[in-house]
Amino acid sequence: MQKPSTPITQIQGLVNQFRYYKSLGDNTLGRLTDTQLVWQYNTESNSIAIIVNHLWGNMLSRWTDFLNTDGEKLWRDRDTEFEVAEMSKVQILEKWEAGCKVVYDTLSSLTEVDLEKTIYIRNEAHSVHEAIYRQLAHYAYHVGQMVFLGKMLLNEQWTSLSIPRNGSQQFNRVKIKKW
């Protein structure tokens, strides 16, 4: 019989999920050129650069002083995160890494006592668990957009980040052998 998970092992499970979505973002960003990263389908669409810029702003705001101040920091200018900006791949990767570092540093600093606390995002109360799940869902949503854009841009040159199309049976055969 499996032992029930403790709050800290639950946090580690969530960290693993954040790392999974970061790896999808990493693999997408690594495949694209500077020009592809700033490409927009139309003026109402976000480029990958804009998505990363928004995630960076969100990560810094939400996770800086996570337990003590509202997650929507007064210094954040969310609207400018969506403005078209010419950024190089290096600049995009720097923002991606800086944002993710704040997330991981904060999560790794949490204690069991912290998990019982209430935090605020835009003056709305959240349990620490709710806030973490909220951010995980938000990041997964945007990373999915990044992957979709990467697939559009690379078309036939795209290689799957998970189970390739028409590869489920082969994947399952290999997985079942490991069980």
Image: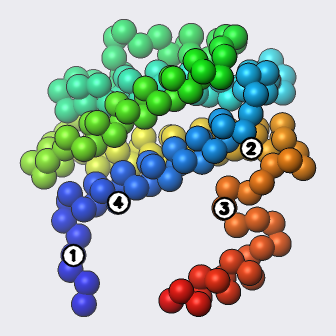
Between circles 1 and 3, the one closer to the viewer is: 3
Q: Amino acid at mark 2?
A: Phe
Q: Residues within 10 Å of mark 3 (few under 14, many from 20)?
A: few
Q: Residues within 10 Å of mark 1 (few under 14, many from 20)?
A: few
Q: Which residue is mark 1?
A: 4
Q: Amino acid at mark 4?
A: Gly
Q: Which residue is mark 4?
A: 13
x%, y% of residue 61? 37, 23
Residue 52 sits above or below residue 84 on the image: below
Residue drawn at (51%, 29%), measured in percent from left and top?
A: 96
Between circles 3 and 4, the one closer to the viewer is: 3
Element carrying mark 3: loop
Marks 1 and 3 sit apart, C-alpha to C-alpha, by 30 Å
**Lower sequence index among marks 2 and 4:** 4
Q: Which of the 4 image quarters holds residue 31?
A: top right
Q: Amino acid at mark 1?
A: Pro
Residue drawn at (47%, 11%), measured in percent from left and top?
A: 77
The N terminus, quarter of image = bottom left
**Lower sequence index among marks 2 and 1:** 1
Element carrying mark 2: helix
Q: In screen coordinates, is 139 left or right of 68?
A: right
Marks 2 and 4 sit apart, C-alpha to C-alpha, by 25 Å
Residue 158 sits above or below residue 85 on the image: below
**Lower sequence index among marks 1 and 3:** 1
Q: Which residue is mark 3?
A: 162
